[in-house]
Each structure stands twice: as C-alpha cells, then as structure tokens.
Image (spheres, rainbow, N blue to C red):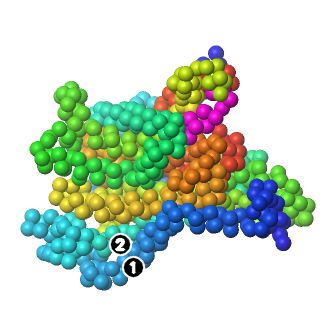
Amino acid sequence: MNMVRFLIRRVITGIVVLWVVATGTFFLFFTAIPESAVARNLAGRSASPSVLAETTRYYGLDRPIPVQYWHFLVNLVHGNLGQSFYTQEPVTTIIKQDLPPTVSLVIGAVLLWLIVGLAVGILSATRARSLFDRLATLGVLAGISAPTFVVGELLIITVFVQLNKHGINFIQTGFSPLSQGFVSWLGTLILPWVTLAVVQAAVYTRLSRGSLLDTLGEDYIRTARSKGLSERRVLYRHAVRAAMTPVVSQLGIDIGGLLGGVLVVEQVFSLHGLGYQVVTAISQGDQPVVIGFVIIAAFFVVVANLLVDMSYAALDPRVRIS
Amino acid sequence: MSITEVQFQATSIEDAPAVAIQGRSQWQLTWRRLRNDKVAIASIVVILLMIAFALAAPLIAAAVGHPVDQAYTLKGENSFGNPVGPGTNGFLLGTDYIGRDLLVRIAYGARISLFVGIVTTALATIAGVTLGLVAGYFGGVVDAVLARVFDAALAFPFIVLALALASVFHPSLAIVIGVITFFSWAGISRIVRGQTLSLKEKEYIEAARSLGAGPWRIMFLDILPNVLGPVLVLATLYIPTAVVFEATLSFLGIGIPEPAPSWGNILGEAQSFYAVAWWYVVFPAAALLITTLAFNLLGDGVRDAMDPRTERLFAGVKSERSKKNKRKIGKGIGPDLAQAVLVGEPNVDQSGSATGEEG
C-alpha cells in the first residue's frame, strides 16, 4: 500500500518535471527572442520572406503567447512534436529511426560500467590498501580526469586505425543494426561502449569501494562474522547488498548525465543515433528536432529515476520499513 | 582579536590539542600537510607550468615564427593536403587541417581552457557561497525557496540547456562561461547552506548577535571563514570539471567558435584526420589530460591536508572508516556537474538534511 502511494507520488513528480522542462523549452525557444527571430530559427537561416511568413503562421507565432503555449502543450500531449524543417518528416518519426543505435549504446555501456566498476570496487574494498587497491585508485583518478571524447579519440587512433591498417576489419565506425548480424553489430559498438563506460566505471569503482568499506565496519557485519558465516557469505549476502544503495542512487543521477556522454560518443564514432541527429540539427538550425530531443531526453531521465526509486526498496530492507 | 579568531582557536583546541599548544592556525596546518604531499606539490608545479605555457603563447608564436591563425598551405601540408607531422618543416608538434602550427594553437588553447576553468569556478564560488549563506542563515521561506532552486539546478540536464542555447544563439565564450557557471554554483550552495545551518546555532554566533552584529556581518565575517575549507576543496575540483565541460562543448561545435583555438575545438577538427595525423589528436589530448589530472590530484591533496582522516592515495595514513561514500564524484560531463565534487569535510552530511534524495 505504502509502495503504491510512493509510486503514485513519484509518477506525479515526474510529470511535473516534464512539464517544467517543456515549459522551459517553450519559453527559451519561442519567447526569449523576438518573434521574427523565432520564425527565422524555425525556418532556417536563409529562408525567403514568404517562407518566413508561412512559418510564422504555421507555428502560430502571430498569436498571443498564452495561446501558443496552450497549443504547444496540447500538441505535446498528443505526441506531436512538429516536423523537421529540413526533411519535412515528423520529429517523432526521426526520433524513432534514431533510437536503436542510442538504445544499443546506452544499455551495453551501462552494463559494462556497472560490471567493471562494481567488480573492481568490491575487490579494492576487500583488499583495502593492497597494491591492487592502489593501482585501481590511480586508475580511477585517471578515468575521472579523462573527458569522454578524448578517450574515444585515443581509442580510435590506437585500436580502430591500427587494426584496420593491419587488415583486421572487425571494429568499424558507424552503426550496423543487430538484424544484420551480431558480429558486425558488436564491431560497431564495442569501442563506443568502452568509451562511455571508462569514465563511469571509474566513478562506480570509487563509489562502491567507499560504500562497501563503510558497510564492512557496521555492527551487523561483525554479528554475521561472529555467527560463523563464511567470509564469502558475509560479503555477498550481507555487505554488498546494503552497500549498493548509494550506487543505485548515483545510477539515477547518471542516467541524466548520460545524455551528454551519448552525444559525444555518437559524434566521435559517427554512430547515427539521437545524439548525432541533434548535433546535426543544431548546426542546421533545425529547431523542431532540437525541441523534440530535449523533451524526449527529459522523458527518459524521468523514467530512469522512477525505476531507480523502485529498485531501492528491493535492495535495502530498511527503505521498505520507513 | 575578533570573535571569529577566538572560535577558530577554540575549534583547533578541540580538534587537535597537540598542535593548538603551538598556536598554529588551521590554514598553517593545512599548508604544512600539503607541503609534505609530494603528489600535490607536483600537481601545483604542473599547473604553474601549464599557466606559464598559456601566458607565454605569444612568445612561443614569436619564437617559432608562426602566428596562431596563419595557415601554411605549402610547408604546413603534405602533397595530399594533409597535416604534416611533428618536426617537419619547423613545426615542432606538426600542423592542423589547414597547415597551422599545432604547438602555437595548443598554447593559445591553454589560455581559453584555463581562463574558462578559473573564471567559471570563481563566479560559481561567489554565487554559490553567497546564496548558500543566505539560505542557511535566514532559513524559513528564503531557505525553502532557495533549496528548491538548488535542487532544480542540480537536476537539470545541463547538455540540454547548452544545446538549446547554442541553437537559439550563436555559440560564444560568454555563453560557455554562463552555462558552466549555471551548473556549478548549486553544488557549492548546498554545501555552504548545510554548514551554515549548523554553524549559526553555535554560541559564538549568539555572542556576535548579542554584541549587535547585523546578519550580513555575521554571515561574511563570522560564518564564512569557517566554511572556506570545504569551499576551497570544492573549487579546486570544479576547475578540471569546467575545463572538461568547455572542451566538450567546443568539441561538439557549441562552445568556443572557430578560429579561436580551444583544446576542444582542435580535437573536434582532428576527427577527420584520425588515420593520417595521430599528433593532431595526441598532443591536444595530452594537454587536456595533464591539466585535469593535475587539478584533480591537487584537489585530493588539499582535501587530505584539510582532513587528514580521509584516505590518501600514496601516503600511509590509515583511516578507521572510509569517508568515501560521502563524496559525489564527477565525471566528464553531466547534469551533476555541480555535484562533481569530492567532499571530505566530516560534517558535510548535514548539507543533505533538508534537500534529501528527492528530485
């Protein structure tokens, strides 16, 4: 019962966040700058006067702002994000087309960094101050200092260029859908995954190491040990599970941050997903696509946070009680 | 002797009796510890060298005789029109896609990167500290409103705002500085607010108030000196984040516009030359990595020096329990840029008391 109420509250919060983002987007794009500039932005920088007039009418820019805002929201609720000025396609169609590479990228990268980050973090915490721990800590600091696109570019000039120079064509840039074969799909995604995961894995190593070290100092761990449980059981059944809570909340924060990483990685590896599309749209001044991306991105952030909130209760019994 | 100084000594007596006898201030202690930290000192040296490199950019350009925007289409490009490598035709680090001297461009790029990093951090610190003090000290409605604003600023996907601004206006240095500052101040505010909440209940604040000190005097003369420690650590760690942020925006073409060189836009241009010009990527990337790593190591060192109980990377100080779960660690970019901090002050927990996990 409590859980249901909690979920309902989170869903409402999520909708409010989406509304705030949509409103912010609307006012930034449509009212922060003069109406003629809006039309020019929407119509492209070299549009003729008649196109400008048509755009102004099409988007209702000559109407009062509250009316425009209402239409914007009504369209949004109906899933209508307008159409691209360049291709005339509906923005929703464009987003649907570009979603698969982005989804492949994000899921693979998240799995990779969670596995690597947690494994190294747990090993470091259980062997605190060992050589492995020191090396891991140093690696973490290097990982945190490295901008995503630098990691990507360095991987390209070392791995991708060198392998292809020696006739090994397994790794490619661009994107090959899973339907065209697993190996080519993997070949286009492995470097993007690694790139996106490096920085994050460092963060998660640090986080899980610290959290686990703290948990291992708790009284109930001593109790578990004094009951005669094996160290393995104490570690995995008792300690790791409770130590995961901060990791999960960090994951919630990071899903939002992932947007930036996705944008960069898709750019570096010419992966034609949502991020690549939006950077192109910006350089073309294709505002409807940018607006669509902003709103879709906010939607995913809200959904991800909801999932994270739900998983708290599953991980930590104390959350369920309170 | 001001009330603040009395309080300072009082806390140092509580915290470190052995040292208080010799009458050293907390800052002296911090500096002494920092001085013995080889990694931190090495980082300071590296940072100073990088600043010197940036300042000397015109001198470097004059010394090699290649102005920053001068494209050498003949000697700066090979017969395929590609950049020439390091050491060729007097280009120490090679050339870029239109035959400009890469060394000179990296030196000028250092100016932009360090300028953006330091200016945004300074602006964010001033704004963050002021708003944090105001929220924490006045409490009530002011605090409730400001706390929500901090949360909103922390939760906003930064890249989205950067994209939106870049597509509405033309990219410029001012927008870059504005965007980065906007996403940095809230984290500092949160920490300062938390500290202020606990500090304002202390007796010495009571004493100051009964002596007739006004709220602004108390905030800036009595409370501020006591929150400077964590703020300093935070600020040191914001600089590399801001440097990376600027580089990323410039890389995507929504940051520093061409032809002004920035490490980010140099690396962006290098994208078409992966296979033929490794130097085009390696040298600017190295400059960027060295700078961010040095600032991060320095930030870690400053934090350790302020609070010797935290674990250190190379030193052998054993802590009974790690404080690491209290740190929110930053990554290259993200909406949590403002949270991209390592907080080592032990009583920082209080900062989360009213803001919580929501949002």
| Residue sitting at the far top | A1
Q: In the image, A221: left or right of B267? A: right
> Which corner quadrant holds the N terminus of chain A?
top right
Q: Identify the subunit bearing mark 2.
A: B
Q: Nearer the viewer, residue B19 or B52?
A: B19
Q: Is any part of residue A216 visible from this angle? A: yes
Q: Which residues are magenta?
A: A208-221
Q: Nearer the viewer, residue A201 or A275?
A: A201
Instruction: Please determine whether, in this image, residue B74 is positioned above or below residue A73.
Output: below
Question: Residue B90 at x, y = what percent?
Answer: 20, 77
Question: Badge 1 local density, few (<14 within 10 Å), some, or many (20+)?
Answer: some
Q: Is residue A210 magenta?
A: yes
Instruction: Please determine whether, in this image, residue B9 is positioned above or below residue B338.
Output: below
Label 2: which residue? B107
Q: Residue B56, labelled with which disc? A: 1
At 46% across and 61% down in the image, what residue appears? B294
Q: Identify the subunit bearing mark 1.
A: B
Q: Are marks 1 and 2 in contact (CB under 8 Å)?
A: yes
